[in-house]
Image (spheres, rainbow, N blue to C red):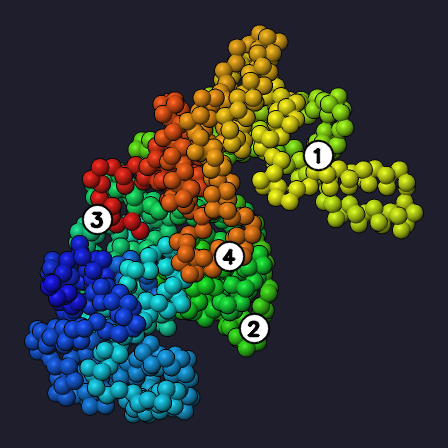
């Protein structure tokens, strides 16, 4: 058996090796191979990380020797030696997972400095202050990332030194000042850890590699992976790269840039840089940087070279790039490139523009837009006609608008959000440790940092509005307030932010629905050309039906008639029907409901003229339409104690008796669905008449209604046969009465396992099936949704018993197997049987892909998820084409 190779020089890899070398390592290798100015280095593979984890946080055998061998090769390339007191090699140690996880794991810069090599470094650069600044930065990062000493403790020492020497900024500290800081930093490490700061560069290196491997499982990385559904077994690579320095003087600098605007998608360079700075100064938001365009004035030749490289990289990867660079003494170095994170609107524009530019085709374009992220395009924005009290402005870091109560702490934000409170996270700047608070918040506001700071990048990825660099804002964490001039805003006060304009306003502001761009429409048009899976909407009102058509739904896949019964003007009549003691009394109430139901169906069928409308007959148990038993008991007791009207008391007691008689131990599995239609056939007969009379009326008016009558919760073909005959008899009566021929179909929901198992028999009485996957998931897994989601599903997800909540992402292995079986059995009886899905899964991309794979005809989802379903259906087609390449560089 050949020995596993754990370490690769950049010159030994390529872009195809990203699952082994991580995205960063693979891209460094690719850029090296195409001749770009990349500082040389090496990559430790993701396999080494996984073996490290599997062996209980121990380096796999042979790894350390292999790293040392490659370091010797690196030394030969650079003419420097690790730990050498004359010409020391300094390196950075960075994580690099196969999927971009910006800011989630750890980085160490300037590794290789110690008390001796820092003197050589000072001599070689002829800049003692610069060398000492690099050393104090290294000790800070190493102490924080590797040795676990909190970052703010180093910052406190630095602040004390600035006070002592009466300076305001870090760069005003002299070399002697920094020497004092370094001494105090080392004392802090020994005090906090009981160990000295290591002076051996090799020891520093392996301690750092150990820390990066461990950071794969830090809290923020785990949260990010859960949020973005990144598998835990991907692991992270470690990149060890020769340092280049952007902080050696005014002919140096560092920056981050996107080849296109990541917020809007516009085709121009977008980013920031700092003169005389190291990379973390830009990314961490420690200093507010300048726009990348200003580099054209400060270093015109460097800017032109960088712009040319950006174009080359975008053409090479055929995708928008996020590029980190450093300028050292007038020489440009590219430190990283990766596919750039972007907003949904930017993703759509970039994809469409790249098709127009001939870089990609339509199939690739639809894969460049994450279907779930289309939600961002449906976000509300501030009403432009509103009078706003703008109290401050910052950088427009992530588009969208939000209002909420001010919260300064990420953990508190998470707790308050669980109670349904809307809030905005306000910080000086965010760090990766704040991710749970960003998830919980409606948006983010920071007083420092730029457009590529942590807050900006993370908020854009989540589709949340963000304003960064609001420098007029002064935050006092101890007092839990911020000030803007004389204005004081306390924790809990409501403010609003506009991430597109960079503005901050007091109070809640009026907002309006977004407008859909031309590029958005083109992407969806392409999706419609490509997909074979139909997309319908779940809608219960004509207004919802009209909105569904606007979003491109080709029909209604679920119209829930029980929602119509809940209207306040109808509920008394429904209760009259339920409380009737004879068929005659019940029929009186049903006759009142008939005209109301007919009006409902008329409106929906008219709004969907020419498109199918699946109308599910009454499904929930009858007690849901009656008052709560406990509330009735309280009312009766109150009336008795206050000598209330005896007639009223008698009525309420009779109602209570009926409520108790109808109550069930397990209503979800009780007297509901088609069981109601069988025990009270007059109810379903009324609904059938309402549907068909509405259709007849529309045909008479020149419309083309396409009603599909759906019988819920069937477990046996005899149930469906009984109710089918009832509907057909009513249909014949209506057609005879109106003289109008009505075309309609009758089908059923498949929502319990027995129906799926007997689908071949059920299909003899059905023109269509529709999977009700909410109930099918409950009955297959034996989970009560309301109980499971609040009590034990979070533990199942945390312990990796389940990868996703089965109520969010379709359970392919269990529920999916039943669905596949039902499709095959149903079509063995009727090859052209129409089959769809109408549960919540109908709008979830992974579930939609499964529906495509097993051959469903349509999915149905809420109106606002119709665009997502259209795109996801097309992506499913492209991804599952024979020989399809799965990675088109999605955002």
- x then y, percent, for residue 658: 75, 37
Q: CA distance from mark 3 to mark 1?
A: 59 Å
Q: Where 130 sits versus 793, above or below?
A: below
Asked whether 267 or 399 is in front, the reply is: 399
What is the total number of numbered labels drawn onto the structure image?
4
Asked whether 419 or 603 is in front, the reply is: 419
- Quadrant of the rendering where the N terminus is positioned: bottom left
Q: CA distance from mark 2 to mark 1?
A: 49 Å
Cβ–Cβ below 8 Å for labels 2 and 3?
Answer: no
Secondary structure at badge 4 equals loop
- x then y, percent, for residue 151: 39, 79
Marks 3 and 1: which is nearer the front? Answer: 1
Q: Which residue is mark 2?
A: 480
Q: Residues within 10 Å of mark 2 (few under 14, many from 20)?
A: some
Q: CA distance from mark 4 to mark 2?
A: 35 Å
Q: Is residue 692 left or right of residue 829?
A: right
Marks 4 and 2: which is nearer the front? Answer: 4
Identified at 22% across, 44% down, the residue is: 885
Q: CA distance from mark 2 to mark 3?
A: 47 Å
Q: CA distance from mark 1 to mark 4?
A: 36 Å
Q: Earlier in the sequence, mark 4 or mark 3?
A: 3
């Amino acid at each position: 058996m050949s020995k596993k190779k754990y370490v690769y020089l950049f010159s030994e890899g390529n872009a195809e090796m990203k699952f082994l070398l991580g995205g960063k390592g693979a891209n460094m290798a690719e850029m090296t191979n195409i001749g770009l100015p990349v500082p040389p280095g090496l990559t430790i593979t993701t396999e080494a990380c996984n073996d490290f984890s599997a062996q209980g946080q121990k380096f796999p055998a042979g790894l350390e020797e292999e790293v040392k061998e490659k370091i010797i090769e690196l030394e030969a390339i650079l003419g420097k030696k690790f730990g050498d007191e004359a010409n020391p090699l300094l390196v950075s140690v960075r994580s690099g997972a196969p999927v971009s996880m910006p800011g989630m794991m750890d980085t160490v810069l300037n590794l290789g400095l110690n008390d001796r090599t820092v003197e050589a470094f000072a001599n070689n650069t002829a800049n003692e202050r610069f060398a000492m600044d690099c050393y104090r930065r290294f000790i800070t990062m190493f102490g924080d990332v590797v040795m676990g000493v909190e970052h703010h403790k180093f910052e406190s020492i630095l602040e004390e030194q600035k006070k002592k020497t009466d300076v305001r900024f870090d760069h005003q500290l002299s070399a002697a000042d920094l020497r004092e800081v370094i001494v105090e930093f080392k004392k802090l490490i020994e005090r906090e850890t009981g160990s000295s700061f290591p002076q051996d560069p090799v020891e520093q290196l392996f301690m750092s590699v150990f820390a990066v491997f461990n950071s794969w499982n830090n809290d923020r990385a785990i949260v990010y992976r859960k949020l973005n559904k990144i598998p835990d077994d991907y692991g992270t690579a470690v990149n060890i790269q020769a340092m280049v320095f952007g902080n050696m003087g005014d002919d140096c600098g560092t920056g981050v840039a996107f080849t296109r605007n990541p917020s809007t998608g516009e085709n121009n360079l977008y980013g920031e840089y700092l003169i005389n700075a190291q990379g973390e100064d830009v990314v961490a938001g420690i200093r507010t940087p300048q726009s990348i365009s200003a580099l054209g004035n400060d270093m015109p030749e460097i800017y032109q070279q960088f712009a040319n490289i950006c174009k080359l990289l975008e053409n090479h990867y055929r995708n928008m790039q996020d590029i980190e660079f450093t300028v050292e003494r007038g020489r440009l170095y590219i430190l990283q490139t990766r596919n750039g994170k972007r907003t949904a609107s930017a993703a759509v524009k970039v994809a469409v523009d790249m098709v127009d530019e001939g870089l990609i085709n339509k199939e690739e374009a639809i894969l460049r837009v994450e279907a779930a992220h289309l939600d961002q395009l449906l976000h509300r924005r501030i009403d432009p006609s509103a009078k706003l009290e703008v109290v401050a402005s910052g950088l427009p870091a992530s588009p969208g608008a939000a209002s909420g109560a001010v919260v300064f702490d990420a953990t508190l934000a998470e707790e308050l959000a669980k109670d349904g409170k809307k809030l905005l996270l306000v910080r000086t700047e965010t760090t990766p440790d704040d991710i749970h608070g960003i998830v919980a918040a409606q948006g983010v506001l920071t007083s420092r940092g730029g457009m590529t700071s942590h807050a900006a990048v993370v908020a854009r990825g989540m589709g949340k509005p963000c304003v960064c660099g609001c420098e007029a804002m002064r935050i006092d964490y101890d007092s839990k307030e911020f000030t803007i001039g004389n204005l004081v805003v306390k924790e809990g006060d409501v403010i609003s932010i506009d991430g597109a304009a960079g503005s901050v306003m007091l109070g809640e502001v009026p907002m309006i629905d977004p407008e859909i761009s031309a590029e958005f429409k083109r992407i969806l048009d392409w999706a419609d050309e490509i997909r074979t899976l139909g997309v319908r909407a779940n809608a219960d009102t004509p207004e919802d039906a009209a909105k569904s058509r606007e979003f491109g739904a080709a029909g209604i896949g679920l119209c829930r008639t029980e929602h119509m019964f809940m209207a306040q003007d109808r509920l008394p009549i429904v209760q009259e029907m339920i409380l009737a003691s004879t068929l005659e009394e019940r029929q009186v109430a049903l006759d009142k409901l008939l005209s109301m139901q007919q009006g409902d169906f008329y409106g929906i069928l008219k709004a969907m003229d020419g498109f199918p409308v699946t109308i599910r007959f009454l499904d929930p148990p009858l007690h849901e339409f009656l008052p709560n038993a406990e509330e009735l008991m309280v009312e009766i007791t109150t009336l008795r104690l206050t000598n209330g009207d005896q007639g009223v008391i008698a009525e309420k007691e009779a109602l209570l008796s009926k409520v108790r008689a109808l109550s069930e131990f397990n209503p979800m599995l009780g007297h509901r669905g088609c069981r109601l239609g069988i025990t009270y056939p007059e109810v379903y007969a009324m609904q059938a008449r309402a549907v068909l009379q509405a259709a007849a009326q529309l045909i008479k008016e020149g419309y083309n209604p396409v009603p599909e009558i759906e019988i819920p919760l069937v477990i046996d073909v005899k149930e469906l046969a009984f109710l089918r005959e009832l509907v057909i008899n009513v249909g014949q009566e209506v057609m005879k009465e109106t003289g109008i021929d009505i075309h309609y179909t009758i089908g059923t929901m498949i929502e319990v396992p027995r129906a799926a198992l007997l689908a071949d028999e059920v299909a003899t009485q059905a023109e269509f099936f529709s999977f009700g996957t909410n109930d099918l998931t409950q009955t297959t897994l034996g989970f009560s949704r309301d109980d499971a989601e609040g009590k034990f599903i979070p533990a199942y997800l945390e312990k990796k018993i389940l990868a996703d909540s089965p109520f969010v992402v379709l359970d392919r292995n269990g529920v999916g197997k039943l669905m596949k079986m039902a499709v095959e059995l149903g079509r063995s009886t009727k090859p052209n049987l129409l089959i769809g899905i109408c549960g919540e899964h109908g709008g979830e991309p992974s579930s939609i892909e499964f529906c495509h794979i097993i051959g469903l005809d349509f999915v149905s989802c809420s109106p606002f998820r119709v665009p997502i379903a259209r795109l996801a259906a097309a992506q499913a087609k492209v991804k599952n084409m024979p020989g399809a390449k799965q990675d088109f560089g999605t955002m």
